[in-house]
Amino acid sequence: MKLAIVILNWNGADMMRKYLPSVIRNSKMEGVEVIVADNASTDDSLKMLAQEFPDVPTVVLDQNYGFAGGYNKALQQIEADYFLLLNSDVEIRQERWVEPMLAYMDTNPDVAACQPKLLKLFDSSEETVPSSSGGSYSPSFGGGRGEAFEYAGAAGGFLDRYGYPFCRGRVFDTIEEDRHQYDELCDLHWATGAALMVRATDFWAVGGLDEHFFAHMEEIDICWRLRLRGKRIVCISQSEAYHLGGATLHQGNPRKTFLNFRNNLLMLFKNLPEKDLKRIMRRRSLLDWVAALQFLVKLDRQNFLAIRKAKREFKKLKPVFAKKRQEVQQNRVSTTDSDRCDFSLLWQYFFRRHKRFSQLPL
């Protein structure tokens, strides 16, 4: 098989019923197969798939292994040159949408992973969405404006000096409209896990996704590890996908806050070069406490406690990740300092008011 488009599902029967037809319809190419991997759903996902999508192969896992573990265990059962990890809340509107990504990967063996341009999918209950100017507008599907980029990946991801992720088209909560300003091919720090195409040999060479993460930040981590081995990550904007986002955990959910803060610290500890490790980790510790106190000032005790718990869990896992760090550093090929951007995103965004990607000192 050339490409396996693998949708990891957990209790997402309604999502698949709504969006899977668009993926099947627009992925009909020789050597391309759409597969659903089920993470031990307790809803009627498997029954629905059998009745409504009998031609779609399924991989059934015995328990919920999370995003990272679920994909690792599912992909072990699939043979393909490339995997495309696709969220169940993604709609595809472009015929043969994977073709530009496949063509680029085929002709550029140094590229380990890529993503399409990720645009916001609005459901019928949404009345307004934030604009890049800080106001709002009503979603329109008939043209007259650019589509909004989607938070989880937009036109490709980057990391600042302290490990804060941002995207072409999304900096913190400021989301731009797609006016084709980021259509040029671009090397990235990370590609979105909502629609991540990865070369199978490279995926397994770095051991797949880190299952300690469970969910959140695992795609940034694997992309970092791939880049440290001299591989490239790119965005192919000729391919497009529409992502609803927040289908599992909404922004502001304490569980999501916990996973994001814990996993970001684990990722930094594992992948930072030795010369930066102590300095960056000290500063991140301070910045995380500032973030926690902001939640406390806003009387959001649950998210304050989530950050505190994340920091405790990070300390517990440090001995395990010390071994992982040793392996990463031993396999490091890249000796450049380009693994992160050399500026503080917090300073640029909150103090210099640079809220668009094009305003950042890249």
Image (spheres, helix red, strand yellow):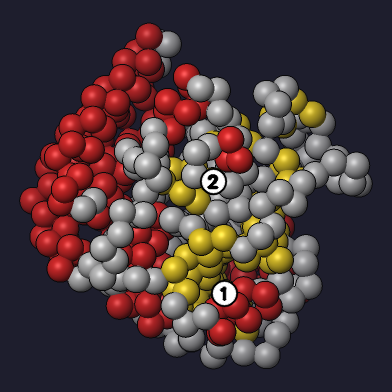
Q: Is 4 placed left or right of 23 in the picture?
A: left
Please, what is the three-letter code of the amino acid marked with disc 1? Ile
Q: Is 282 placed left or right of 39 in the picture?
A: left
- Element class at badge 1: strand
Going 37% across and 42% down the picture, which residue do you hit? 342
Q: Is residue 298 above or below residue 35?
A: above
CA–CA distance in space, label 2 to label 1: 24 Å
Please, what is the three-letter code of the amino acid marked with disc 2? Cys
Q: Is 322 placed left or right of 204 in the picture?
A: left
Question: What is the x, y in percent for residue 26?
Answer: 75, 73
Question: What is the x, y in percent for residue 332?
Answer: 23, 67
Instruction: Estimate how packed mark 2 is, as few (under 14), some (14 to 19) or many (20 or more) residues with alpha carbons within 10 Å.
Output: many
Residue indicated by mark 2: 167
Going 70% across and 85% down the picture, which residue do you hit? 29
Question: What is the x, y in percent for residue 249?
Answer: 48, 41
Asked if one can make out residue 237 in the rendered structure from this viewpoint, the answer is yes
Residue indicated by mark 1: 5
